[in-house]
Image (spheres, rainbow, N blue to C red):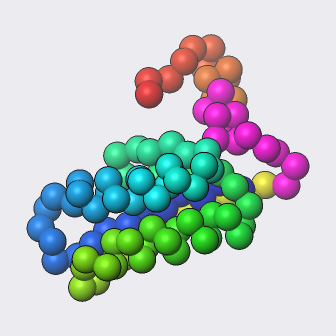
């Protein structure tokens, strides 16, 4: 299962880098495969692993914020492991060249 999530603390101004750094420490400690992008983080794992991780990340930001918005997008495909890398490689094969990262 691939899950993309973003966590946004409200009422903290336009810079949330400190909060994102705290979230990424939690993600790294989980040992789940992940990729960060400018708009969120994609994690690969089982339902229970990923939901537990997102709950912990949400709580980490909520500790120092009055309000937090967390968005989650789930791509669950049976029998297809290692999709974090595989989905991008599949598109690159179709294009015949690597994509910018």
How far across and how far down the image is residue 35, in percent? 51, 43
Q: Which residue is farthest bottom?
A: 66
* Residue displayed at 57% across by 14% down: 97
- Residue 88 falls within the magenta-colored stretch: yes
Q: Which residue is farthest right?
A: 79
Toward which corner of the image does residue 45 lie, by quadrant? bottom right
- Residue 93 falls within the magenta-colored stretch: no
Q: Which residue is farthest left?
A: 13
How far across and how far down the image is residue 19, in percent? 28, 62
* Residue displayed at 62% across by 50% down: 32
Quadrant containing the C terminus is: top left
Q: Is residue 15 visible?
A: yes
Using residue 58 as the reference point, say whether residue 48 is left or right of it.
Answer: right
Quadrant containing the N terminus is: bottom right
How far across and how far down the image is residue 62, in percent? 33, 79
Vertical order, 85 against 2 (above or below): above
* Residue displayed at 87% across by 49% down: 79
Using residue 78 as the reference point, say whether residue 37 is left or right of it.
Answer: left
Residue span colored magenta: 78-89
Q: Which residue is farthest top?
A: 96
User: Which is nearer the eye, 100 or 17?
Assistant: 17
Q: How many marks?
A: 0
Using residue 72 as the reference point, say whether residue 7 is left or right of it.
Answer: left
* Residue displayed at 69% across by 34% down: 86
Q: Is residue 70 visible?
A: no
How far across and how far down the image is residue 93, in percent? 68, 20
Vertical order, 42 against 99 (above or below): below
User: Which is nearer the eye, 91 or 35?
Assistant: 35
């Amino acid at each position: 299962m691939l899950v993309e999530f973003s966590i946004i603390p409200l009422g903290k101004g336009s810079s949330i880098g400190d909060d994102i750094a705290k979230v990424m420490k939690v993600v790294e400690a989980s040992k789940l495969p992940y990729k960060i992008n400018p708009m969120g983080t994609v994690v690969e794992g089982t339902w229970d692993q990923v939901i537990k991780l997102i709950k912990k990340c949400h709580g980490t930001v909520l500790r120092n914020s009055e309000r937090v918005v967390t968005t989650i997008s789930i791509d669950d495909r049976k029998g297809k492991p290692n999709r974090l890398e595989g989905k991008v490689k599949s598109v690159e094969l179709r294009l015949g060249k690597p994509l910018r990262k």
